[in-house]
Image (tube, helix red, strand yellow):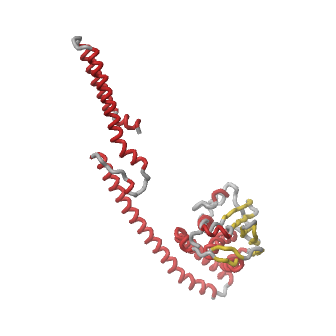
Amino acid sequence: MIRAFLIERRSWIAAFLVLQLAILSVCYIDSSIPVGSVLYVIFLCLILFTLFLVYRYQKETKFYQRLKERENDFDLTSLPEAETPFEKIIENSLVGQSTYLKEKAAYYQAETEETKDDLLGWIHEVKTPLTALRLMIDRLEDEKLKTSFLYEWLRIHYLLDQQLHQKRLPFMENDLYMEKVELGDLLFSEIKTLQSWCIQKGIGFALQLEETEVLSDSKWLSFIVRQLLTNAVKYSKDSDILISSGTRGERAFLQITDHGRGIDPRDLPRIFEKGFTSTVHHGDHAATGMGLYLAQKAAAPLLIGIAVHSELKKGTTFTLSFPKPNDFLKITGM
């Protein structure tokens, strides 16, 4: 702050030094003026000017020092009290900017909430004709045509489901209900939804559930499992998907292993990034890059860890590690 003050007042210092040099020049020109007396006067002026600078430093930098230490937020109570006219200009400017930004933030927040509510309303409205469409598809007698329609219906259903959960994610902790979840019931429900797609691709499921119950939120756990199963089915063909569960120490785990195309080692660090699809299969327009991102975001409040192991052209294993029972005390929604 001292350096900043001296730079700010360099014009004062320069003017003082020039004035002293001018006095010495007059003394040099006029020999009748005693040099000793002039030097004494200059020395006294230098002391007085130094004291003046110290006083001004204490008075002027107090406001700016507190302003520098202040948190960068909209809390105007932490704004230091202005004393001088220039400080009042700065204070009024900061108060005006803060008020303006608060109003803008409130406006955009309200607009975002309105857009979110409209989208959620639209998704719920679309579910009605989508359900009616499923009933119409089920009445079809042509099995080949029926399977094709069911596959497209399933894609729309999952995309809407992703959108719905994506909009709910910021408020997920308000919606948590921790309970004992039967893994068998949850998995069978999700597999049943994928049945037509799996038949079309020649995919079966093998379940080895040593641990049949976990403590979690059933709705959000279903969503996470749904994303992993969808990926497993999407990138597999004519093979079985193995789903197993067990315990390691005090933690339960659920593993989903497919024998599909696998993930390139270059892509593994990025698969949970929003919008990332693949560097190897970059032209795959069916990939949205949102499934794994949303799964990881949903897993965080549930204290569920997601690990992945994959070999290219051999398959991929996703492992969900559930927290210890005592860790649920940390979940605010419990």
x and y, in percent, of residue 186 in the image: 68, 78
Q: Quadrant of the C terminus?
A: bottom right
**Residue 196 visible in the picture:** no
**Horizontal side, residue 38 vs residue 136: left or right:** left
**Residue 41 visible in the picture:** yes
Vertical relation: 88 (above or below) 304 = above
Q: Quadrant of residue 159?
A: bottom right
**Horizontal side, residue 283 vs residue 202: left or right:** left
**Horizontal side, residue 66 vs residue 273: left or right:** left
Q: Quadrant of the N terminus?
A: top left
Which is nearer the eye, 135 or 31? 31
x and y, in percent, of residue 248 in the image: 75, 66
Vertical relation: 114 (above or below) 276 = below
Which is nearer the eye, 229 or 39? 39
Q: Residue furthest top?
A: 31
Vertical relation: 48 (above or below) 251 = above
Which is nearer the eye, 54 or 68? 54
Q: Residue at x 37, y 53 (%)?
A: 79
Q: Quadrant of residue 62?
A: top left
Q: Residue at x 39, y 38 (%)?
A: 4
**Horizontal side, residue 168 vs residue 46: left or right:** right
Vertical relation: 66 (above or below) 313 = above
x and y, in percent, of residue 246 in the image: 76, 70
Counting every numbered tag in the picture gives: 0
Q: Quadrant of residue 57?
A: top left
Q: Residue at x 66, y 79 (%)?
A: 193
